[in-house]
Image (cartoon, rainbow, N blue to C red):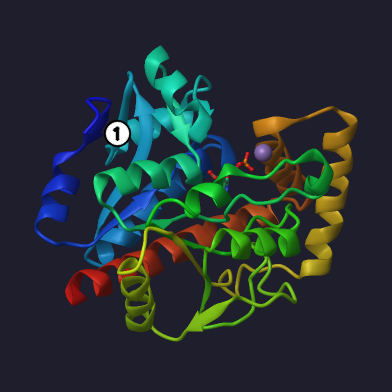
């Protein structure tokens, strides 16, 4: 295994003992949520995972090493420093070689999780096909990496700022199942409804674990396990669409491109909604961490 990959003791020992482990990405900490909500949420997700009897394994780059199982102090460093690179798959080698701090996206995190032997990750919303992506080709590497590594990502669908129908089409083409947990409607991140169907659905964590185990026996592809945001924090879709429309026009007008698009849109939507999308984002992240830990627990006991 690469000397650049550092799996911390608690994670390594837990995996060796067959205990459930849940990976966490760090872009959402460094670039997805504002301080201090980012730090509180990251630590809250770790607690939610531990409460279910699982081990959290936050992933990020520090000092030329890819760390699986960041300490609370290291999470704080990623949450507070302004010098943290957003690291997707293509950036892994460059940021490791330069030795700086890097927050890993879903794509980069699941690659590292798979190398460490972790099969479940929790996040808020997956990256996907951006609106207008059919001409700009702005499609998150998250989708392609999910087709390559056997990690189940628990999330509230893909981020609402995206083109959700095209995101689902591409996931289908890439062979990634989209499994609704207790629903057969694909959630729209801040909203419970999208009008789109998942490819499959399960009613319990045991069924989710069984589906993942069956798939794992036949190849090395990931999966999406989606659950809607908690009802108390969810927002009506029409309202969210208004804020997103404005944020996208502003991004176009100010020439924001590439990896900056997602953080820009998320923060503008949060401002326009007077923090309501932020509250929904935090609530769904905590809920997804909990569900991921329960699925990892069921997978571990069935192994
Ligand atoms: N989910 C959130 N907030 C985020 C992200 C996901 O609730 O900030 C991050 C994830 O790390 C995801 C990334 O992989 O945004 C996608 O960025 P891009 O569209 O540039 O691939
Ligand atoms: Mn992009």
Residue 217, percent across and down? 30, 69
From the image, tell me which residue sits under label 1: 67
Residue in the foreground of this view, choosing between 18 and 38: 18
Residue visible at 52% across and 43% down in the picture: 28
Residue density around tag 1, few if under 14, some if 14–19, many if 20 or more, within 10 Å: many
How many discs mark residues in the rendered view?
Answer: 1
Judged left or right of residue 276, residue 2 is left
Q: Quadrant of the N terminus?
A: top left
Residue visible at 80% across and 50% down in the picture: 131
Give the quarter of the image for residue 264.
top right
Residue visible at 87% across and 35% down in the picture: 252
Give the quarter of the image for residue 139.
top right
Compared with 47, 88 (above or below) is above
Q: Residue lying farthest bottom? A: 203
Give the quarter of the image for residue 32.
top right
Residue in the foreground of this view, choosing between 20 and 116: 116
Q: Residue lying farthest top? A: 98
Q: Quadrant of the C terminus?
A: bottom left
Residue 129, percent across and down? 70, 51
Judged left or right of residue 229, residue 68 is left
- Residue 206 showing in the rendered view: yes
Judged left or right of residue 280, residue 68 is left
- Please tell me whether mark 1 sits on a helix, a strand or a loop: strand
Q: Determine the quadrant in which ligand 2 lies.
A: top right
Residue in the foreground of this view, choosing between 146 and 74: 146
Residue visible at 33% across and 75% down in the picture: 214
Residue 47, percent across and down? 31, 56
Residue 283, percent across and down? 53, 61
């Amino acid at each position: 295994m690469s000397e650049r990959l550092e799996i911390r003791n608690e994670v390594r020992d837990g995996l060796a003992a067959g205990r459930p482990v849940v990976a966490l990405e760090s872009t959402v900490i460094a670039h997805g949520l504002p301080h201090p909500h980012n730090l509180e949420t990251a630590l809250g997700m770790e607690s939610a995972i531990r409460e279910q009897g699982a081990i959290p394994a936050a992933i990020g780059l520090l000092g030329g090493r890819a760390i699986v199982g960041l300490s609370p102090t290291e999470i704080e460093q990623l949450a507070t420093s302004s010098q943290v690179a957003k690291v997707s798959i293509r950036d892994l080698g460059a940021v490791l070689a330069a030795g700086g701090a890097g927050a890993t996206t879903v794509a980069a995190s699941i690659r590292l999780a798979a190398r460490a032997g972790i099969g479940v990750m929790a996040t808020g919303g997956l990256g996907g096909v951006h609106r207008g992506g059919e001409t700009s080709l702005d499609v998150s590497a998250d989708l392609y990496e999910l087709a390559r590594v056997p990690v189940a990502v628990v999330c509230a669908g893909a981020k609402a700022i995206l083109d959700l129908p095209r995101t689902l089409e591409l996931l289908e083409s890439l062979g990634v199942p989209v499994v609704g947990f207790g629903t057969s409607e694909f959630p729209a991140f801040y909203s419970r409804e999208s009008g789109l169907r998942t490819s499959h659905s399960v009613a319990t964590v045991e069924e989710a674990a069984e589906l993942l185990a069956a798939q794992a026996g036949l190849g090395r592809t990931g999966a999406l396990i989606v659950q809607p945001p908690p009802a108390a924090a969810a927002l009506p879709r029409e309202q969210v669409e208004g804020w997103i429309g404005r944020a996208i026009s502003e991004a176009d007008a100010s020439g924001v491109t590439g990896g900056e698009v997602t953080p820009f849109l998320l923060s503008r939507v949060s401002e326009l909604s007077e923090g309501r999308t932020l509250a929904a984002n935090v609530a769904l992240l905590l809920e997804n961490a909990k569900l991921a830990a329960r699925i990892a627990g069921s997978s571990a006991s069935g192994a």
